[in-house]
């Protein structure tokens, strides 16, 4: 059987009326959630960087509240640079708050996922585009938020779906025969050799995901992601 990536547009992304996924709601319900985040410019700001061989000492445990307030300060600083005539750095890589979600490690986000999206680890796949009788069960849940310029390098894993709650993303997708595990952040690609870029991005299917869209990534398909808007928020799950 041949599997293809699928993008479903304009799905309802919340079961709790009034939950917006904006900073205020996240700070109210999940401020203490923690993730390892790199604040340094010495390495690419990629999720689970130490798993890709990057220096683990450059990753620091950061609460969601600290991260969101830092993003706000960064935007204010860049705005001040522009207004002063100095000019903010364009295309700079932003940090990414990206974390696996379960009741033990991330109880606050796990509670939000359960109440707002109906998603729990080991539970049914309740994403909007799946029928209520869908036989699949979630194996991993993930939550991510980041500003424009944050993202993930090319990687692959089992079947997954990604629901964009706020913002906009660009995806690069490659079939299993062309999949790769890479440290090459999408924004780094412009400064790398042709060989490095072709290894990860040549021949990729490129698509843009908007709030409410669900993207299905089949088993072992390579994919890289770049957030295109500030405060881009997503929920993702791998399933079997």
Image: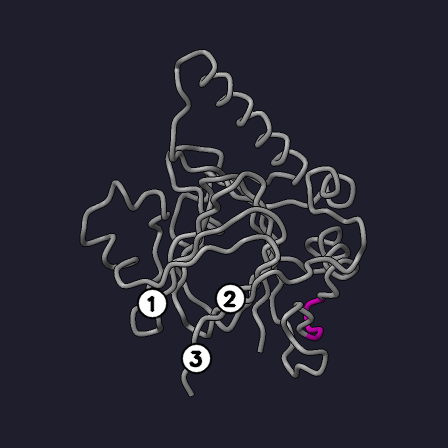
Determine whether 69 is above or below 12 in the image.
above
User: Between tags 3 and 1, which lies in front?
Assistant: 3
Which numbered disc covers residue 68? none
Which numbered disc covers residue 179? 1
Distance in Å between CA atoms under marks 3 and 1:
14 Å
Q: How many marks?
A: 3
What residue is at 76 percent from the left and 58 percent from the top? 116
Q: Is residue 100 left or right of residue 226?
A: right
Residue 37: image location, x then y, percent: 53, 41
Pointer 3 or 1: first along the chain: 3
Q: On the image, which quarter does residue 68 sit in? A: top right
Q: Is residue 50 visible?
A: no
Give the residues drawn in magenta, as a range.
Answer: 120-124
Q: Is residue 161 left or right of residue 204?
A: right
Residue 15: image location, x then y, percent: 77, 60
Distance in Å between CA atoms under marks 3 and 2:
13 Å
Q: On the image, which quarter does residue 224 sit in? A: bottom left
Mark 3 element type: loop
Q: On the image, which quarter does residue 214 sit in? A: bottom right
Determine whether 116 is above or below 68 in the image.
below
Q: Main secondary structure of the magenta part?
A: loop
Viewer-proximal residue, 209 or 110? 209
For disc 2, the marked residue is 7
For disc 3, the marked residue is 3
Question: Which residue ends up furthest to the top in the rendered image?
Answer: 84
Mark 1 element type: loop
What residue is at 42 percent from the left and 88 percent from the top? 1
What residue is at 58 percent from the left and 50 percent from the top? 144
What residue is at 72 percent from the left and 61 percent from the top? 117
């Amino acid at each position: 059987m041949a599997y293809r990536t699928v993008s479903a547009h304009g799905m309802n992304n919340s079961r709790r009326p009034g939950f917006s996924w904006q900073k205020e709601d996240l700070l109210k319900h999940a401020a203490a959630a923690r993730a390892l985040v790199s604040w340094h410019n010495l390495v690419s700001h990629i999720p689970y960087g130490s798993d890709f061989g990057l220096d683990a000492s450059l990753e620091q445990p950061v609460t969601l509240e600290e991260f969101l307030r830092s993003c706000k300060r960064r935007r204010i600083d860049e705005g001040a640079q522009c207004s002063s005539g100095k000019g903010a750095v364009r295309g700079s890589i932003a940090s990414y708050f990206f974390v696996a979600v379960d009741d033990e490690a991330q109880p606050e986000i796990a509670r939000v996922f359960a109440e707002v999206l109906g998603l729990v680890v080991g539970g049914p796949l309740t994403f909007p585009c799946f029928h209520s009788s869908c036989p699949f069960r979630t194996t991993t849940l993930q939550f991510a938020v980041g500003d424009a310029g944050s993202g993930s390098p090319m990687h692959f894993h089992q079947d997954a779906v990604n629901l964009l709650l706020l913002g906009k993303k660009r995806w690069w997708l490659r079939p299993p025969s062309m999949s790769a595990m890479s440290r090459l952040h999408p924004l780094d690609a412009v400064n790398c050799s042709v060989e490095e870029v072709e290894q990860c991005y040549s021949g990729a299917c490129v698509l843009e995901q908007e709030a409410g869209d669900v993207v299905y990534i089949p088993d072992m398909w390579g994919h890289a992601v770049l957030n295109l808007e500030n405060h881009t928020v997503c929920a993702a799950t791998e399933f079997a």
